Image (cartoon, rainbow, N blue to C red):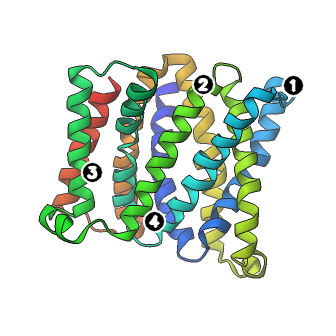
Amino acid sequence: MIYLKLFLTAVLWGGTFVAGRIVAREVEPAAGSFLRFAVASLLLLVMTWQAEGRLPIPRRKQMIPLLLLGITGVAAYNIFFFLGLKIIPASRASLIVATNPVFIALGSALLFKDRLTPGRMAGIALCLTGAIVVISRGDIIALLSHGIGQGETFILGCIVSWVSYSLVGRGVLKEISPLAAVTYACLIGTCLLAVPAVFEGMFSAFTGYSLTSWLGILFLGILGTVVGFIWYYEGIKTLGPTRAAVFINFVPVSGVILGWLILDERINLSLILGALLVISGAWLTNR
């Protein structure tokens, strides 16, 4: 059963790119991010209360790291996420974001002196090559001449945000449970997103959102955030982090397939080649 949950988690996380693409067509970035995490925060509060009896009060030294989690992993990541998905297909975005493990491994090596084995270095090289193929759409000469597109730049902002979140979280999780840490990150991020969401005109546009956009927001908040988090951490608890992390390699695959099925996005040779390189590289890096 746990293997099925981990596989479905990868499908849900791949689906967030499709849902994000749908929501981004109609909802502004800060508003979409705020609504997603307002939903997620309410559910996480209830779950944390049930699991731990209360929401643990953080110590003073934990306040800044928790604030950074909210800024990087929730507020910044999701604004970049929606900005990018306004411009580029969900399939392409999911493959670029799939390089996260590579940059986390590099950051861990620089900051925490984690060892980079030959296998991990080969994985990093493969993953980065795949990302270049995806970003350039197979035309690397054009990429060198004209630079990275705006949509791809925003999705690269997602990577910077998530790597920062992961590296900060490494220290936080030594003293606070994953559920409590994520709940605090979501609450803080939601509060930070409220002001730009209001300035974007969220309240005036609120009643005009289509049913499709609301379903996308609910998918992102409930299935893509809360359910995915619970099932993934059940997998870590049962199988250990290394074996559970293998299933993350299915996220870009599901993102590409769901983008093709639901949004009728084209799957071309550069996307297939990039996907193979990124997934192979991510697998080697996470071994």
* Badge 2 density bin: few <14, some 14–19, many ≥20, Cα 10 Å: few
Report the residue marked by disc 2: 171
- The quadrant where residue 175 appears: top right
Give the structural element (helix, strand or loop) at label 4.
Answer: helix
Task: Please name whichever residue, 160 or 242, is drawn nearer the observer in this view of the structure.
Answer: 160
Q: Label 4 is placed on what type of residue?
A: Gly
Task: Please name whichever residue, 172 or 134, is drawn nearer the observer in this view of the structure.
Answer: 172
For the residues labelled 2 and 1, the Cα–Cα distance comes to 24 Å
Give the mark nearer the N terminus: 4 vs 2: 4
Look at discs 2 and 1 and give the one toward the viewer: 2
Q: Position of residue 67 (x, y in %)?
A: 70, 42
Give the mark nearer the N terminus: 2 vs 3: 3
Q: Label 1 is placed on what type of residue?
A: Gly
Report the residue marked by disc 1: 53
Q: Label 2 is placed on what type of residue?
A: Gly
Give the structural element (helix, strand or loop) at label 3.
Answer: helix
Report the residue marked by disc 4: 84
For the residues labelled 2 and 3, the Cα–Cα distance comes to 29 Å
Look at discs 4 and 2 and give the one toward the viewer: 2
Q: Position of residue 185 (x, y in %)?
A: 69, 42
For the residues labelled 3 and 4, the Cα–Cα distance comes to 15 Å
Q: Quadrant of the C terminus?
A: top left
